[in-house]
Image: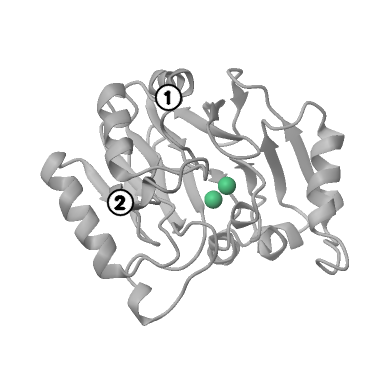
Amino acid sequence: MSDAADIVFKVWGARGSIFSGGADKTEFGGDTTCFSLASGAGMTIIDAGSGLRAMGEALSRSAVGTAPEIDLLLTHLHFDHICGLPFFEPTFCDNTILRIWSAAFERDEDFRETLARVMSPPIFPGFRHWDSVRLCTALPGIAIPLAMGGMAVPFPLNHPDGAFGWRIDCGGKSVTIASDHESGNAGIDARIVEAARETDLLVCDATYTDEEIACRGGWGHSTWRQGVDMGEAAGARHMLMTHHDPRRADGEIERMENDARTRNGAVTFARTGWTRIL
Ligand SMILES: [Zn+2]
Ligand SMILES: [Zn+2]
């Protein structure tokens, strides 16, 4: 078992809205939202976008003969955040314990019913291993214990149909996820800053450019500049920009990253495979 104080954070998908591949999108990747945090023998995953498939493959390879216990925290149920779920290899392994958490429902049954509705014929040919997955509801502002140790607290984001960010603390280190979020609601923005206070890594929504955001009010996303505003106000040690627009090619994201770094050197634009030890 590694040092319990270490969190190994990894990006498995940083694209927003829909998978977007191609030769001009190899550096940042085309898979949709998925991040993992590993500490000791435990594992916490944020969101089940298409990046979850490769993550499950890697986990199955490394966990042969063990019984991994996984907490998967969902920000919300928009399709780009759950489409990887039926392709997550560890759910086909009987000794995996998988808990999926959402703060969007009051009752576990409502959560199960809603998720099952998406993963049912004729939309999807049934999710056969559904029964082995534990679906759990969390309350905004209330901590849940994690199998990897430490805890996670959900907090509201400003997004159509609702979404929840997560502050994860483990062994004195922390990661705060605040995508998908549209900046501009003073009350919600202030609560995010509070939740992300002094966090080691703040994951921000950077879907749009300054030009694009002007005609995207109500779409539920932000710019890197708004993410940096939030991170600086919270005293975040590093900021990771994510949910890249599906049209955005590598070169354009690189230019956005360079611009952001001229303002604050502690900014990275998320690339599939990017890893950081906290
Ligand atoms: Zn999204
Ligand atoms: Zn969304």
The front one of 30 and 91 is: 30
User: Does the closest atom of ligand 1 sit within 8 Å of the Cβ of label 2?
Assistant: no
Determine the secondary structure under disc 1: helix
Q: Is residue 110 left or right of residue 165?
A: right
Q: Determine the image quadrant of residue 159.
A: top right
Please give the name of the residue rendered at 36% of the width and 36% of the height, measured from the top-left corner.
202
Looking at the picture, which amino acid does disc 2 mark?
Glu
10 over 126 or under it: above or below = above
**Residue 248, position in %: x, y?**
36, 65
Q: What residue is shown with label 2? A: 211
Asked if disc 1 is less than 8 Å from ligand 2, the answer is no
Q: Position of residue 160 (x, y in %)?
A: 60, 40
Identified at 32% across, 29% down, the residue is 230
Which comes before the other along the chain, label 1 or label 2? 1
The extreme left residue here reads 262
Asked if residue 206 can be seen in this view, the reply is no
Task: Point out residue 14 in the picture as x, y percentages from the top left corner.
Answer: 44, 57
Q: Position of residue 70 (x, y in %)?
A: 63, 44
Q: Residues within 10 Å of mark 1 (few under 14, many from 20)?
A: some
Q: Is residue 256 above or below residue 181?
A: below
Give the CA separation, mark 1 to mark 2: 21 Å
Q: Secondary structure at mark 2?
A: helix
Task: Find the residue positioned furthest to the front.
Answer: 215
Q: Nearer the viewer, mark 1 or mark 2?
A: 2
| Amino acid under disc 1 | Asp
Of residues 66 and 115, which is closer to you in this image?
115
Q: On the image, which quarter does residue 125 sit in?
A: bottom right
Residue on which the image places disc 1: 189
Quadrant, the C terminus:
top left
Q: How is the image coloured?
A: one colour
| Residue nearest the observer in this picture, 97 or 260 | 260
Q: Residue at x 23, y 44 (%)?
A: 267
